[in-house]
Image (cartoon, grey):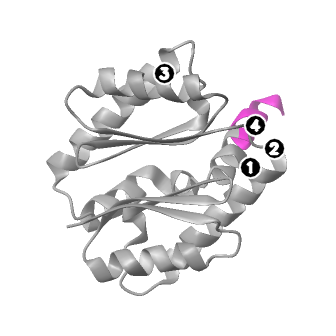
Amino acid sequence: MHKTIGPLLAAVALIAAGCAPALIGAGAAGGYKAATDKRTVGTMIDDATLSARVKTALVRDDEVAARRIDVDVVEGRVILTGAVESEAEAERAAAVARRTAGPAPVVNQLTVGGRSIGRAVDDTVLGTRIKAALMKAPGIRSWNVDVDVNDGVVTLTGVVGSAAQRERVVAIARDAEGTRRVVNNLTVK
Protein backbone atom coordinates (compact mmCIF):
# COMPACT_ATOMS: atom_id res chain seq x y z
CA MET A 1 0.00 0.00 0.00
CA HIS A 2 2.78 2.48 0.86
CA LYS A 3 4.21 2.07 -2.65
CA THR A 4 1.13 3.77 -4.12
CA ILE A 5 1.15 6.73 -1.75
CA GLY A 6 4.18 8.43 -3.35
CA PRO A 7 2.74 8.49 -6.89
CA LEU A 8 -0.66 9.50 -5.51
CA LEU A 9 0.85 12.42 -3.58
CA ALA A 10 2.83 13.46 -6.67
CA ALA A 11 -0.36 13.40 -8.77
CA VAL A 12 -2.23 15.50 -6.21
CA ALA A 13 0.67 17.99 -6.06
CA LEU A 14 0.72 18.30 -9.85
CA ILE A 15 -3.03 18.88 -9.99
CA ALA A 16 -2.85 21.44 -7.18
CA ALA A 17 -0.02 23.23 -8.98
CA GLY A 18 -2.05 23.39 -12.19
CA CYS A 19 0.08 20.79 -13.96
CA ALA A 20 -2.68 18.48 -15.16
CA PRO A 21 -1.01 18.12 -18.58
CA ALA A 22 1.86 16.36 -16.82
CA LEU A 23 -0.58 13.70 -15.76
CA ILE A 24 -2.10 13.39 -19.22
CA GLY A 25 1.26 13.04 -20.83
CA ALA A 26 3.99 15.62 -20.94
CA GLY A 27 4.97 14.47 -24.41
CA ALA A 28 1.51 15.11 -25.84
CA ALA A 29 1.19 18.44 -24.07
CA GLY A 30 4.68 19.49 -25.11
CA GLY A 31 4.03 18.43 -28.69
CA TYR A 32 0.85 20.50 -28.84
CA LYS A 33 2.57 23.49 -27.27
CA ALA A 34 5.48 23.27 -29.70
CA ALA A 35 3.10 23.03 -32.65
CA THR A 36 1.09 26.08 -31.57
CA ASP A 37 3.82 28.29 -30.13
CA LYS A 38 4.76 31.29 -32.26
CA ARG A 39 8.45 30.95 -31.35
CA THR A 40 10.85 28.83 -33.37
CA VAL A 41 11.78 25.44 -31.94
CA GLY A 42 15.32 26.71 -31.39
CA THR A 43 14.04 29.69 -29.39
CA MET A 44 11.75 27.45 -27.32
CA ILE A 45 14.69 25.17 -26.52
CA ASP A 46 16.93 28.12 -25.66
CA ASP A 47 14.21 29.59 -23.41
CA ALA A 48 13.60 26.26 -21.65
CA THR A 49 17.33 25.74 -21.14
CA LEU A 50 17.81 29.23 -19.71
CA SER A 51 14.78 28.80 -17.45
CA ALA A 52 16.18 25.51 -16.10
CA ARG A 53 19.61 27.06 -15.52
CA VAL A 54 18.16 30.02 -13.60
CA LYS A 55 15.83 27.82 -11.53
CA THR A 56 18.70 25.47 -10.69
CA ALA A 57 20.88 28.39 -9.61
CA LEU A 58 18.06 29.68 -7.38
CA VAL A 59 17.59 26.23 -5.82
CA ARG A 60 21.31 26.01 -5.07
CA ASP A 61 21.40 29.43 -3.39
CA ASP A 62 21.02 29.19 0.39
CA GLU A 63 19.59 32.71 0.71
CA VAL A 64 16.67 32.20 -1.69
CA ALA A 65 13.48 30.16 -1.17
CA ALA A 66 13.35 28.95 -4.78
CA ARG A 67 10.12 27.00 -4.30
CA ARG A 68 8.28 30.32 -4.08
CA ILE A 69 9.77 31.71 -7.27
CA ASP A 70 8.49 31.02 -10.77
CA VAL A 71 10.99 31.48 -13.59
CA ASP A 72 9.58 32.12 -17.07
CA VAL A 73 11.71 32.82 -20.11
CA VAL A 74 10.19 34.18 -23.32
CA GLU A 75 12.49 34.94 -26.23
CA GLY A 76 15.51 35.20 -23.95
CA ARG A 77 13.83 37.49 -21.40
CA VAL A 78 13.85 36.06 -17.85
CA ILE A 79 10.83 36.93 -15.69
CA LEU A 80 10.76 36.18 -11.96
CA THR A 81 7.36 36.07 -10.23
CA GLY A 82 6.20 34.85 -6.85
CA ALA A 83 6.41 35.94 -3.23
CA VAL A 84 9.53 36.06 -1.07
CA GLU A 85 9.98 36.93 2.59
CA SER A 86 12.06 40.11 2.24
CA GLU A 87 13.32 42.76 -0.14
CA ALA A 88 16.83 41.38 0.39
CA GLU A 89 15.67 37.94 -0.80
CA ALA A 90 14.01 39.48 -3.88
CA GLU A 91 17.20 41.36 -4.70
CA ARG A 92 19.31 38.25 -4.11
CA ALA A 93 17.07 36.17 -6.42
CA ALA A 94 17.34 38.81 -9.15
CA ALA A 95 21.13 38.95 -8.75
CA VAL A 96 21.39 35.15 -9.01
CA ALA A 97 19.19 35.22 -12.11
CA ARG A 98 21.23 38.01 -13.73
CA ARG A 99 24.51 36.23 -13.00
CA THR A 100 23.14 32.98 -14.46
CA ALA A 101 21.37 34.55 -17.45
CA GLY A 102 24.41 36.49 -18.63
CA PRO A 103 23.39 39.14 -21.16
CA ALA A 104 19.70 38.13 -21.11
CA PRO A 105 17.43 40.74 -19.52
CA VAL A 106 15.96 39.82 -16.13
CA VAL A 107 12.63 41.28 -15.02
CA ASN A 108 12.14 41.03 -11.26
CA GLN A 109 8.41 40.97 -10.46
CA LEU A 110 8.80 39.28 -7.08
CA THR A 111 6.59 40.54 -4.30
CA VAL A 112 7.58 40.69 -0.65
CA GLY A 113 5.43 38.99 1.98
CA GLY A 114 4.27 35.50 2.75
CA ARG A 115 0.92 34.03 1.83
CA SER A 116 -1.45 32.19 4.11
CA ILE A 117 -2.59 28.73 3.10
CA GLY A 118 -6.03 30.17 2.36
CA ARG A 119 -4.55 32.85 0.09
CA ALA A 120 -2.43 30.26 -1.70
CA VAL A 121 -5.53 28.14 -2.33
CA ASP A 122 -7.47 31.19 -3.56
CA ASP A 123 -4.60 32.03 -5.93
CA THR A 124 -4.51 28.45 -7.26
CA VAL A 125 -8.27 28.46 -7.84
CA LEU A 126 -8.10 31.84 -9.58
CA GLY A 127 -5.27 30.68 -11.82
CA THR A 128 -7.19 27.52 -12.71
CA ARG A 129 -10.33 29.52 -13.54
CA ILE A 130 -8.38 31.88 -15.79
CA LYS A 131 -6.61 29.01 -17.55
CA ALA A 132 -9.96 27.25 -18.11
CA ALA A 133 -11.47 30.45 -19.53
CA LEU A 134 -8.48 30.83 -21.86
CA MET A 135 -8.92 27.22 -23.03
CA LYS A 136 -12.57 27.94 -23.90
CA ALA A 137 -11.86 31.25 -25.66
CA PRO A 138 -11.95 30.95 -29.45
CA GLY A 139 -8.73 31.90 -31.18
CA ILE A 140 -6.60 31.82 -28.00
CA ARG A 141 -3.81 29.26 -27.82
CA SER A 142 -3.93 28.83 -24.07
CA TRP A 143 -0.90 26.50 -24.01
CA ASN A 144 1.22 29.50 -25.02
CA VAL A 145 0.14 31.57 -22.01
CA ASP A 146 1.54 30.97 -18.54
CA VAL A 147 -0.73 32.19 -15.75
CA ASP A 148 0.82 32.87 -12.34
CA VAL A 149 -1.18 34.26 -9.43
CA ASN A 150 0.20 35.72 -6.23
CA ASP A 151 -2.09 37.48 -3.76
CA GLY A 152 -4.67 38.10 -6.49
CA VAL A 153 -2.12 39.62 -8.87
CA VAL A 154 -2.24 37.70 -12.15
CA THR A 155 0.94 37.60 -14.21
CA LEU A 156 0.55 36.56 -17.85
CA THR A 157 3.65 35.43 -19.72
CA GLY A 158 3.97 33.90 -23.17
CA VAL A 159 3.60 34.49 -26.87
CA VAL A 160 0.38 35.32 -28.72
CA GLY A 161 -0.29 35.87 -32.41
CA SER A 162 -1.73 39.39 -32.39
CA ALA A 163 -2.40 42.48 -30.32
CA ALA A 164 -6.10 41.57 -30.33
CA GLN A 165 -5.31 38.15 -28.83
CA ARG A 166 -3.12 39.79 -26.19
CA GLU A 167 -5.93 42.19 -25.24
CA ARG A 168 -8.43 39.31 -25.10
CA VAL A 169 -6.16 37.28 -22.79
CA VAL A 170 -5.64 40.31 -20.53
CA ALA A 171 -9.41 40.97 -20.46
CA ILE A 172 -10.16 37.36 -19.48
CA ALA A 173 -7.67 37.55 -16.62
CA ARG A 174 -8.83 41.02 -15.52
CA ASP A 175 -12.50 40.00 -15.51
CA ALA A 176 -11.99 36.83 -13.45
CA GLU A 177 -13.48 37.13 -9.98
CA GLY A 178 -10.69 37.61 -7.45
CA THR A 179 -8.23 39.34 -9.77
CA ARG A 180 -6.75 42.42 -8.10
CA ARG A 181 -4.39 43.38 -10.91
CA VAL A 182 -2.96 41.96 -14.15
CA VAL A 183 0.72 42.11 -15.09
CA ASN A 184 1.01 41.70 -18.85
CA ASN A 185 4.26 40.06 -19.98
CA LEU A 186 2.75 38.75 -23.23
CA THR A 187 4.74 39.09 -26.43
CA VAL A 188 3.04 39.44 -29.82
CA LYS A 189 4.70 37.49 -32.58
- Marks 1 and 3: in contact by CB < 8 Å? no
Q: CA distance from mark 3 to mark 2?
A: 23 Å
Q: Is residue 135 visible?
A: no
Q: Examine the rendered structure and indicate whether residue 162 appears above or below residue 23.
A: below
Say the numbered circle drawn on residue 101: none
Q: Position of residue 104 (x, y in %)?
A: 23, 35
Q: Name the residue that disc number 3 marks.
A: 92
Q: Name the residue that disc number 2 marks.
A: 116
Q: Quadrant of residue 186?
A: bottom left
Query: Which one is closest to the eye, mark 3 or mark 4?
Result: 3
Q: CA distance from mark 3 to mark 4?
A: 39 Å
Q: Name the residue that disc number 4 marks.
A: 4
Residue type at mark 3: give it.
Arg
Residue at the image point whose x is 55% and y is 68% from the top: 131
Q: Examine the rendered structure and indicate whether residue 141 appears above or below residue 7.
A: below
Q: Earlier in the sequence, mark 2 or mark 4?
A: 4
Q: Please, what secondary structure does the residue beneath circle 3 have?
A: helix
Q: Please, what secondary structure does the residue beneath circle 2 have?
A: loop
The 10 Å Cα crowd at callout 4, few under 14, some 14 to 19, many 20 or more, is: few
